[in-house]
Amino acid sequence: MINVTIWNENLHERSNEEVQKVYPEGIHGAIAEGIANDDFEVHTATLEQLEHGLTQDVLDRTDVLLWWGHRGHEMVADEIVDRVHQRVLDGMGLIVLHSGHFSKIFKKLMGTSCDLKWREADEKERIWVVDPAHPIAAGLGEYFELEREEMYGEHFDIPKPDELILVSWFEGGEVFRSGCTYHRGNGKIFYFRPGHETYPTFYNRNVLKVIANGIRWAAQDGAVKPVYGNHKPLEEIKVK
Amino acid sequence: MINVTIWNENLHERSNEEVQKVYPEGIHGAIAEGIANDDFEVHTATLEQLEHGLTQDVLDRTDVLLWWGHRGHEMVADEIVDRVHQRVLDGMGLIVLHSGHFSKIFKKLMGTSCDLKWREADEKERIWVVDPAHPIAAGLGEYFELEREEMYGEHFDIPKPDELILVSWFEGGEVFRSGCTYHRGNGKIFYFRPGHETYPTFYNRNVLKVIANGIRWAAQDGAVKPVYGNHKPLEEIKVK
Amino acid sequence: MINVTIWNENLHERSNEEVQKVYPEGIHGAIAEGIANDDFEVHTATLEQLEHGLTQDVLDRTDVLLWWGHRGHEMVADEIVDRVHQRVLDGMGLIVLHSGHFSKIFKKLMGTSCDLKWREADEKERIWVVDPAHPIAAGLGEYFELEREEMYGEHFDIPKPDELILVSWFEGGEVFRSGCTYHRGNGKIFYFRPGHETYPTFYNRNVLKVIANGIRWAAQDGAVKPVYGNHKPLEEIKVK
Amino acid sequence: MINVTIWNENLHERSNEEVQKVYPEGIHGAIAEGIANDDFEVHTATLEQLEHGLTQDVLDRTDVLLWWGHRGHEMVADEIVDRVHQRVLDGMGLIVLHSGHFSKIFKKLMGTSCDLKWREADEKERIWVVDPAHPIAAGLGEYFELEREEMYGEHFDIPKPDELILVSWFEGGEVFRSGCTYHRGNGKIFYFRPGHETYPTFYNRNVLKVIANGIRWAAQDGAVKPVYGNHKPLEEIKVK
């Protein structure tokens, strides 16, 4: 059983009628329903909750955390960001969705600006698999399409991904590294591009498949626990 | 259920008394017993068998192939190497052990000489985990030791590993990239260093754990099947 | 001074009037003129020449070899391919252009099928820089366009590039990893996508800039020369 | 001409007689003298200076910044760290030496704890080249030795290096990824392990060669300048 916590700032859904219609249960609600699965124990948390719903206890019980944020990035308390950061280094998986690219936690883990190009123009996005052997792509076709999405374009200012799995094509002339993995400490991180709040992206079965695959990939048992600091030499070798 | 085929040239075991004592059932037999597991269906194959035991049918049913060879590299028929190569590109996992670094199949997949330094001097090897989040390291300590092994030293002439998981330290002054992964086509490849025929390495529980982890990592369901060749454009875009 | 040898099969140019008009001096001739530079000593070689113009002596004097081939891949002698392969491992740079993706030498160095999707439809290609810090991208804008090119699309069956520098967008809906680097042995390899024989791609100043940058990147002085085989231990450590 | 600024906290040298004897001109002074070269314009800066000697003007004129710190990590003002961070993303090279692994700037760029094992026991370090084609290794032998150094051991909690060039062997049983490169934004970063303040490491000609090579590698002309934010589509494609 993998314990999944879906974090969503849940701001657009409560203030914008258009978004409300698309996501009446919030983006977190749509994802929770879409990935429901006998292997996942799914909970949600939102910005407005005490400690943004991310108490130490919640994080300690979370195997994989999903993160959707946009307007509220600056409203996330630094203390909570530091707590999530530490849990990732300790082994919690993290899946950062769409506009989460600019979240404090993603920027802190990446060390770069995480900036990009964007355009809202109801464009078609075609997401190509460039690493067909990767478990996050399991069950997909060679590509899948989203009829309307916000465009994100290169240059995407991230560290070189450990693995590049998906590359998006946009109607208006851009490409984007849309599925990227990283190890940071004992934690596995997956950035996945689509998911603008005005489109029904999180009901798309391919998007949900990628997210579910990402969760399985990011969860782990038995990670090695490194010890840091002063270390003794091999006994049988006489260090001068 | 993961179908595992352990291929061993099985030459030293039949011609060298010292090796026979260490591996009375052959290296393949020791590994087969050591990784026995409800999730694995394990078979073995050896050089002397018809088609080296690697018929198209056997390969088609194999999810992950293990490869141990040394003296007999040149005795492996090119036709069989091509067949294994194609199966790897089509998605079969491949775990190359120790002296398999010089096998035809590994060199064909790597594109380099795969050469290295070596020394047989009963040295201690300490194998360090450098990527603690990787599933192939699951359940290990920060390092494990083999009291006596053949030394392999850098430079190891391989392509940059997709992932570097293990680095060996040798008593006599060398280091070695001992656990390396690659994707080639739809196949996942794991090179794992230890396993000289005169040492009881394949009875070591950490070695067996790494091999079993490697098998789980290399096996896959639902890999994307790319189509190559002439491709039609998006219908709604008029290509001039 | 960097010694550059531009190899071209030079078949289309001599048999197809359309290509002849675009490249009256051959693709090799156009590149040679386009990259002419005080730092480069440029020579050309073609398939029809004795030993395809790639004698041991020529290769020994070559710092960076460029390779354009298409129809004649199978006409390149295996012996010459082995010779080029060895020179790359020994430190010669190699720049593989466009349809050279299917050349014997590239496939031998990559270990994969190197297959891809393609379409000849006079489409626009937009080549985006995804690693702006890389010297091969120096002096480019964020992207550059080729008004008409052959489409190459993912999945491109290559090993994960050591560095991914350029990603192409095509009008008809595809993306492609168009600028990829690899180290193989002591040699540096750069694959660069554009360059179909019926388009004036090799007169484009951005294409020429990338090729010239690639040559500077792939050339090297002072590479470490590894020694392989039996290796002595540290003297002061007594190996048992 | 490459403008190099060597930053050193310069604390041990002024408070510890042993260090003073080894580095009477400070670690920065020793490096400055050791890498002196017609291609480098070298300046130094230290913690005690106004703005730690790293004014905006100094950074703007710096092509490559070297960083040695240890005891004074916490004394470096966050404002200066942010300034250096921004300059790296904008294209300044950064070479982090030894205990600089725990500097604020390195941790901010890496996003991990950057922790490691260590031991001060006058041990021999043998630094092996694992990527002989890399320009940072140019002119080295297959390995070089430092008779006495502080040990740093794995696990080193860093992101997977873009390139791993050097791996250290230590007498007491450890290994370490000692030469690692990263791109972050437009900046190139090189971490180089040796350099404990009580040893004459920065007079060693191989160490100086690696540092000088690193400076040449990290300096750049003509980097692409990405533009972020709202982006217009291709004109000739009608976005619905």
Image (cartoon, coloured by chain):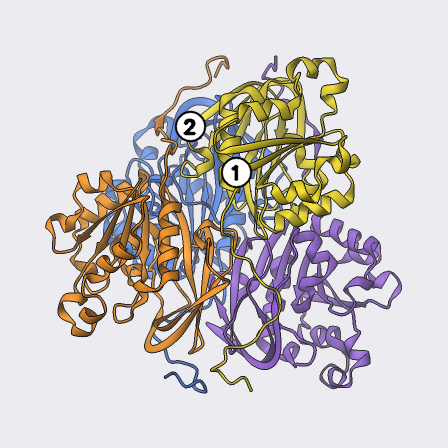
Chain colours: A orange, B yellow, C purple, D blue
Residue under the point 34% across and 72% down: A149
- Classify mark 1: helix, strand or loop: strand
Check disc 1 and give the amino acid type. Answer: Ile
Q: Which is more toward the observer, C63 or A88?
A: A88
| Coordinates of residue A39 in the picture (x, y in percent) | 33, 43
| Coordinates of residue A157 in the picture (x, y in percent) | 38, 61
Residue D11, placed above or below residue A194: above
Q: Which is more toward the observer, D149 or A128?
A: A128
Residue C43, placed above or below residue B10: below
Q: Residues within 10 Å of mark 2 (few under 14, many from 20)?
A: many
Q: Which mark is residue B2?
A: 1
| Coordinates of residue C97 in the picture (x, y in percent) | 66, 67
Check disc 2 and give the amino acid type. Answer: Glu
How far apart in space, not on screen, are marks 2 and 1 (Cα)?
Answer: 28 Å
Q: To which residue does mark 2 refer?
A: B142
Q: Which is more toward the observer, A235 or B99?
A: B99
